[in-house]
């Protein structure tokens, strides 16, 4: 009948060996699980150490007991070092230099043990005896001499619990529930087990009491706590795998609902996993294994080379990638596919996993093509419209200087028929002709440039001088119409910054419109007033043109600035639209309002020149 000692030590060895095999397989499946590999070495040391220690408990001679102690050192090395490394890797705690010292001392003791007789711990073993232990008679040393280098083993034995204590303290100081749980559940039992084994072994080796050398049983407590922690991770991984499968199903369902398919390429197996939706989009078999070559075979030959090059480039650089390409379905139709994905690289830069999504964007491509064609048509319509606006603007703006040229030409003809010929007056008329012709040329050139490119030839301008120039231009027209044009622009106004020709054209348009409105005045005064004032807060000049006409209907006061809106029978409705565009291009505003005593007032603002602003400041 087997004794309790035989059953306990044998069962311990068997259980430890089984755990070691399981965790060695885990490491074989996932080489990143180095903690499992360290745990496997520790359990291997425990299993072999338990068997050797069982033989020591039943040794018959001092020589046999000493040889078994010699054979116990390799399993102890695996057990101690494997356990210490596991704690460091799995719990991510403990000083590395202290771990290195522990492993270094254990390695030194192991090497010295190989050259020691009968073993590292004893110089000689003189006699052994038997005592009762767990209902069995076990062997104990009754007379022996401790080895002269045993202090080194004792030091190594004390450094191991010191390292474990450092692990526990480090975890506790992190102040997180998980870290403190591991400190209590893992670090605490391991520390107690190691200290217990240390005390039992040192009592026997230093000949303090005649007890059996039982080093292995306390380590069962330590490895049990470690096994529970690892098993907890396995259970957590199992739950995570289940959650991932459920998430994958939900993601696949969501992607399918959005018309997208998911795919994954594994560099290890060189296989492509794809959902049914992805296979359908690419025209691939729903059940067969897929390789990248299978995908390239269904790609349109015109896109296959570019797709292959883009995929290889994405594998080298990693990160996100996206590429549209065409596939040819078994029915012979062409389908546009948009592929997006991410490339995960390994530590050495090699591609490990590629994940992505594919969508059918055939209709989107068709809509983009139709939109592009429509955009071209709209651009053509825009150019035609722009040409019409340019023609209308030129016709409107050039009509005033041409009218002046016509009048001066007719005046010259009259003067040439008179006797005697008035040379001075004829010179004045010719000068007006040249001036009006130059003005027409400038209006045409600057208006074309501005409408096409938006450029202004800005300069510093005196508003008083500008108003006087406009008065000179309209004097003959005002006289013919019997309209009095008054100018109340003070010379003290700060100079403004703008294009002189454009600003004078705006003011001229407003004055001519005011003269047209005054022709419908109720009394016979027919008066037009030009005024200007400084708006200091906005650093601009407010220029006004007022008339005594019938005013503007309230419902039309905002529409009069729209293109081709006019109240004149012979107007084309472009003057105010062009004028507002010119003023806004200068950074100002143009608006109209009715006067209380009758008539209307048009306002426009022009920014004051920066130099003038600095001087006033």
Image: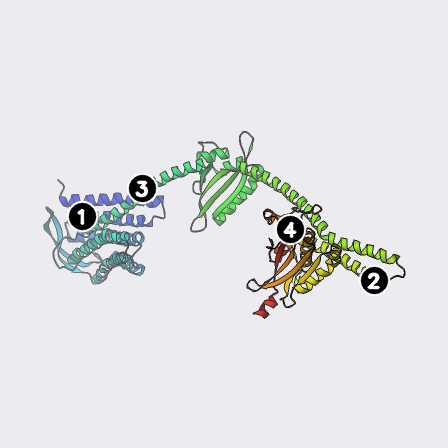
| Quarter that holds the N terminus | top left
Question: Which residue: 28% across, 51% down?
Answer: 178
Q: Which mark is residue 239?
A: 3
Residue picked out by circle 4 = 550
109 relative to 350, above or below? below
| Residue 261 screen position, x and y as percent | 46, 37
Question: Which is closer to the viewer, label 2 or label 1?
Answer: 2
- Answer with mark 1 or mark 3, whichever residue precedes in sequence: 1
Residue picked out by circle 1 = 55
Residue picked out by circle 2 = 425
69 relative to 613, above or below? above
Q: Secondary structure at mark 3?
A: helix
Task: Using a 10 Å C-alpha cutoff, classify the residue at mark 1 as few (fewer than 14 neighbours), some (14 to 19) or many (20 or more).
Answer: some
Task: Using a 10 Å C-alpha cutoff, classify the residue at mark 4 as few (fewer than 14 neighbours), some (14 to 19) or many (20 or more).
Answer: some
Task: Check contact, mark 1 vs mark 4: CB within 8 A.
Answer: no
- Answer with mark 1 or mark 4, whichever residue precedes in sequence: 1
Q: Is residue 557 left or right of residue 184?
A: right
Q: Secondary structure at mark 2?
A: helix
Question: Which is closer to the viewer, label 3 or label 4?
Answer: 4
C-alpha gap between disc 3 and disc 2:
108 Å
Question: Which residue: 17% across, 45% down?
Answer: 8
Residue 530's image quarter? bottom right
Q: Foreground: 172 or 313?
A: 172
């Amino acid at each position: 009948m087997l004794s309790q000692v035989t059953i306990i030590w044998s069962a311990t060895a068997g259980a430890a060996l089984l755990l070691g095999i399981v965790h060695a397989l885990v490491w074989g499946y996932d080489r990143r699980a180095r903690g499992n590999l360290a745990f496997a070495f520790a359990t291997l040391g425990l299993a072999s150490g338990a068997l050797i220690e069982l033989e020591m408990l039943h040794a018959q001679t001092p020589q046999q007991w000493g040889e078994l102690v010699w054979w116990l050192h390799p399993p102890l090395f695996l057990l101690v070092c494997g356990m210490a490394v596991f704690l460091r890797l799995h719990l991510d705690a403990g000083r590395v230099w202290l771990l290195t010292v522990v492993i270094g001392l254990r390695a030194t003791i192991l090497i010295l043990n190989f050259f020691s007789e009968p073993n590292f711990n004893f110089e000689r073993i003189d006699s052994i005896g038997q005592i009762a232990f767990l209902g069995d008679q076990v062997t104990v040393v009754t007379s022996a001499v401790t080895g002269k280098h045993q202090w080194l083993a004792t030091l190594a034995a004390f450094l191991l619990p010191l390292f474990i204590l450092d692990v526990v303290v480090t975890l506790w100081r992190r102040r997180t529930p998980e870290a403190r749980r591991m400190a209590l559940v893992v670090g605490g039992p391991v520390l107690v087990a190691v200290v217990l084994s240390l005390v039992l072994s040192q009592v026997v080796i230093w000949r303090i009491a005649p007890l059996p050398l039982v080093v292995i049983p306390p380590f069962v407590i330590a490895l049990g706590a470690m096994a529970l922690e690892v098993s907890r991770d396995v259970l957590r991984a199992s739950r995570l795998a289940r959650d991932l499968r459920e998430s994958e199903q939900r993601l696949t369902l969501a992607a399918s609902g959005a018309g997208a398919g998911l795919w994954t390429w594994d560099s290890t197996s060189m296989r492509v996993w794809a959902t049914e939706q992805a296979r359908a989009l690419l025209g691939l078999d729903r059940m067969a294994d897929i390789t990248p070559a299978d995908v390239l075979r269904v790609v349109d030959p015109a896109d296959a080379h570019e797709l292959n090059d883009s995929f290889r480039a994405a594998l080298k650089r990693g990160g996100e990638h996206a590429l549209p390409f065409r596939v040819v379905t078994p029915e012979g139709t062409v389908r546009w596919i948009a592929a997006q994905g991410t490339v995960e690289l390994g530590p050495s830069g090699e591609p490990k996993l590629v994940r992505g999504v594919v969508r059918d964007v055939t209709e989107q491509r068709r809509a983009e093509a139709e939109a592009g064609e429509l955009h071209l048509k709209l651009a053509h319509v825009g150019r035609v419209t722009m040409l019409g606006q340019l023609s209308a603007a030129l016709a409107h703006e050039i009509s005033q200087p041409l009218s002046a040229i016509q009048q001066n030409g007719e005046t010259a003809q009259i003067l040439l028929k008179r006797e005697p010929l008035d040379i001075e007056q004829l010179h004045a008329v010719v000068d007006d002709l040249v001036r009006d012709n130059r003005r027409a040329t400038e209006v045409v050139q600057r208006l074309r440039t501005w409408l096409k490119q938006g450029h202004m030839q800005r300069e510093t301008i005196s508003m008083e001088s500008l108003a006087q120039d406009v008065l000179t231009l309209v004097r003959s027209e005002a006289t013919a119409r019997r309209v009095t044009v008054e100018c109340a622009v003070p010379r003290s106004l700060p100079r403004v910054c703008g294009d002189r020709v454009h600003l004078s054209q705006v003011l001229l348009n407003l004055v001519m419109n005011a003269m047209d409105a005054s022709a419908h005045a109720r009394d016979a005064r027919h008066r037009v007033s030009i005024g200007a004032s400084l708006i200091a807060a906005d650093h601009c000049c407010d220029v006004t043109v007022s008339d005594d006409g019938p005013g503007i209907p309230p419902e039309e006061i905002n529409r009069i600035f729209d293109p081709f809106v006019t109240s004149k029978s012979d107007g084309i409705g472009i003057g105010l639209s062009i004028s507002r565009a010119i003023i806004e291009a200068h950074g100002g505003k143009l608006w109209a309002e009715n006067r209380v005593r009758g008539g209307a007032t048009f306002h426009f603002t022009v920014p004051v020149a920066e130099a003038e602003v600095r001087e006033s400041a």
